[in-house]
Amino acid sequence: MSAERARVRVPFRRQNLTIHRPIIYGNTARILTPEERVEPVPAEHTHRWTVAVRSAASAPDSDIVGGADDLSYFIRRVNFKLHDTYPTPNRSIDKPPFEVSETGWGEFEVQIRITFTTEAGEKPLTFYHHLKLHPWTATGELEIPSTEVALQKGPVHSWQYDEIIFVEPFSNFLTTLVAHPPTPMPAVRRRPAPFHLAHLAGHEELKNGGVPEFSQAMEKEEASRLQQAKRSVHLEQEKWKDILADKERELEGLQKLLSG
Ligand code: SLL
């Protein structure tokens, strides 16, 4: 009788392959109206905010930024570490939506840690988001407007687009990822971008309290901003090269005069 060999499936990594999933993280905030500033809201709290990790595409006609897809097929848990002034600063969210809503009075750095599903076999990912409560300003300086002005400006959005890249994923995990293709972002911009550039570019829609959205056009806009920045750095370099050459000629002339 031949010995029966146990067949053990050893997970293996798919070599020379990477796959990514677009996510956004950030926050929405709005100032509380005088009527909302009543018990049980602590007297010093001025804002209500939500910090979240979501899929990049927004659901059609939704009033939330991003979140069209449920990310729990690859995210097991998201930990949000709030400022120590909160009685329970460590918030662990183990099912979607991966978000925390609170009231408060101040901006601070939120530590976000994403723990992937066991199947992914990936280490947790830790990063930070600056919780933004006060409206964007043209100069980037922090200005705290009056309640009336803040109410008139509407909700504040501060979202960051990013891509989680899985390098040589385990084959089972790859199968799971492929079974959940991300909802594509709209190719063209239909709404303002959900971060300060929208304000700087003077997108009037945002000032009217519209809900912003990420789009593929954003990427092209970012590329042209980088191009523009590269061009101005190049021009500046050329200018200083010319100035340097002039000064060197002047120095040479003076040295000749001295030794002559
Ligand atoms: C600041 N460095 O001074 C920041 C800290 C802390 C914000 C902001 C509420 C806490 C509670 C809260 O908004 N903390 O519930 O007491 O601006």
Image (tube, helix red, strand yellow):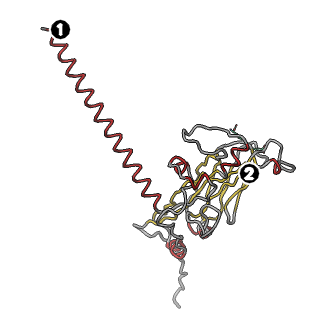
Name the one closer to the observer, 246 or 119: 246
- Pinpoint residue 218: horizontal percent, then vertical percent: 47, 58
Give the vertical position of 46 relative to 69 (above or below): above
Secondary structure, mark 1, is helix
Mark 2, other Cα within 10 Å: few <14 / some 14–19 / many ≥20: some
Ligand 1 image position (quadrant)? top right
| Ligand 1 closer than 8 Å to label 2 CB | no
Q: How many marks?
A: 2
Name the one closer to the observer, 55 or 105: 105
Kind of residue indicated by mark 2: Arg
Q: Please name the residue that numbered disc 1 is placed on.
A: 258
Give the vertical position of 11 relative to 238 (above or below): below
Q: Quadrant of the C terminus?
A: top left
Secondary structure, mark 2, is strand
Kind of residue indicated by mark 1: Leu
Mark 1, other Cα within 10 Å: few <14 / some 14–19 / many ≥20: few
Mark number, residue 48: 2
Residue at the extreme right? 39
- Pinpoint residue 102: horizontal percent, then vertical percent: 75, 52
The residue at 67%/43% (across/down) is: 107
The residue at 18%/13% (across/down) is: 255
